[in-house]
Image: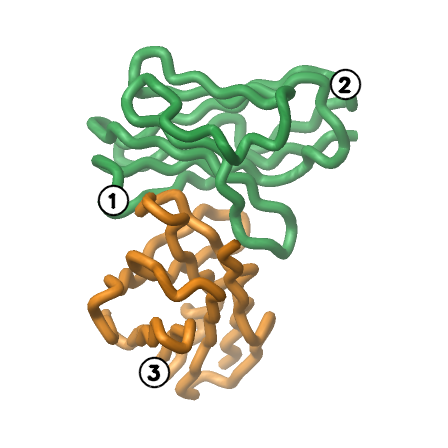
Chain colours: A orange, B green
Amino acid sequence: KQEVTQIPAALSVPEGENLVLNCSFTDSAIYNLQWFRQDPGKGLTSLLLIQSSQREQTSGRLNASLDKSSGRSTLYIAASQPGDSATYLCAVPFSGGYNKLIFGAGTRLAVHP
Amino acid sequence: GAGVSQTPSNKVTEKGKYVELRCDPISGHTALYWYRQSLGQGPEFLIYFQGTGAADDSGLPNDRFFAVRPEGSVSTLKIQRTERGDSAVYLCASSSREGNTIYFGEGSWLTVV
């Protein structure tokens, strides 16, 4: 059974720091891995999707890497800003379904000025 | 519409009552998903519709939960004989078809007292 774990559960940093959020999964036979952002009281927004054949994806200050063999993904946030404060979740599909997703519990990020 | 719309945004009900939660997906999206998110956890998959039919309802926790999508657009999640453990945020999401980018609504926060 696939399990997704995110470390750390919470993180508080000063503005400007570079950050690494970690995601691990137990079954390496995945189609892809997605990173989402969730603001308090809001839905989820897809940030990056890495296909199983890819090693990384970049969008602006965000870079996500995927190492299937070790069951790990990292989300790197460069030059963090207070507007980056949110919960970041990673998710992988159930076997056979792209958007039938298994989520980690998320990392709650607070970036203070 | 511009995004996935969910109503009500908040619902407080007494234990044992019946509730309905509505989801209006992005126009033209054939795939629709319901997820449930408890405090401090990632979303958990409930049910997936492709068009009017429930393609996968394996995440529904028990027979008190039921969902419909009669015309292939709006969906209603129905919960009978609510229990305090049903308290959570119920998230709806849609995509243009299975496998494409998924868009989440802001959720319906259900509290059973």
User: Which amino acid, by three-letter code, is at mark 1?
Assistant: Gly
Could you say which is closer to the camera, residue B12 or residue B18? B18
- Dot 3 corresponds to which residue? A78
Q: Quote the CA–CA distance across marks 3 and 2.
A: 49 Å
Decide if residue A85 is in sight here.
Answer: yes
- Kind of residue indicated by mark 2: Gly
The circle on residue B108 is none
State the image coordinates of residue A53 (x, y, percent, origin top left).
Answer: 21, 67
Camera-side residue: B26 or A81?
B26
Residue shown at 54%/48% (left/top)?
A41
What element does badge 3 sit on?
A: loop
B73 lies left or right of B107? left
The quarter of the picture where residue A90 lies is: bottom left
Q: What is the crowding at mark 1: few (fewer than 14 residues within 10 Å), some, or many (at least 20)?
A: few
Q: Nearer the viewer, residue B49 or A84?
A: B49
Q: Which residue is mark 2?
A: B16
* Chain of the residue where label 3 is placed in the rendered structure: A
Which residue is tagged 1? B99
